[in-house]
Amino acid sequence: LELRYSQLADALLIDDESSSSETTTTTTMKEIETVIDNQIAVKNEKRLALGKPPLKSYFKDYALLQEVTKAGCNKICGDITIAHTASNISEFSVTSFYTAGLELGLYDQYQMVSYYNDNSD
């Protein structure tokens, strides 16, 4: 199965389209973007306090891609398992934006697992 970003974003709008107001059709996408923007602002404040430069501008694009992909796949498939490559996720990594989807209820904590690779064989 191959899906475009626009198809995943559209999947998040389906329920909203039942409303009579045209402005509600973009609510989910706007909510995702708003939460990510807020998280970037908080992370940049922390980075400033640590004497580090702000996050690069592409972090927003990658965070949106990541959250729309997970939320859209969850909605289309009815469930999803999100495997992270580490159990300890840096607060300044793109992966750390997974909390946006959790905050918005686009997927649940039980759907997330840490990938464990035991190289001891």
Image: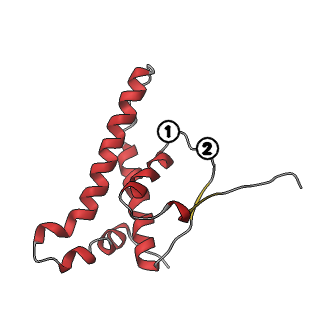
Name the spot of residue 92 as percent of width and height, x first.
48, 37
At horizontal 40% and vertical 21% (from top left) the residue drawn is 49
User: Where does label 2 land, which residue?
Assistant: 88
**Local crowd size for mark 2, using a 10 Å CA cut-off: few (<14), some (14–19), many (≥20):** few
Residue closer to the observer: 92 or 58: 92
The part of the image, by quadrant, that contains residue 4 is bottom left
Residue type indicated by callout 1 = Glu
* Quadrant (top left, top right, bottom left, bottom right) of the C terminus: bottom right
Name the spot of residue 100 as percent of width and height, x first.
39, 52
Whether 49 is drawn above or below 35: the answer is: above
Name the spot of residue 108 as percent of width and height, x first.
47, 63
Residue type indicated by callout 2 = Asn
User: Secondary structure under badge 1?
Assistant: loop
The part of the image, by quadrant, that contains residue 27 is bottom left
User: Secondary structure under badge 2?
Assistant: loop
Residue farthest toward the right in the current orientation of the protein: 121
Q: Can residue 77 be seen from the camera position used here?
A: yes
At horizontal 31% and vertical 49% (from top left) the residue drawn is 35
At horizontal 26% and vertical 72% (from top left) the residue drawn is 13
Report the Cα–Cα distance between label 1 and label 2.
Answer: 9 Å
As drawn, is 1 to the left or to the right of 8? Answer: right
The numbered disc on residue 115 is none
**Local crowd size for mark 1, using a 10 Å CA cut-off: few (<14), some (14–19), many (≥20):** few
At horizontal 82% and vertical 52% (from top left) the residue drawn is 119
User: Where does label 1 land, which residue?
Assistant: 91
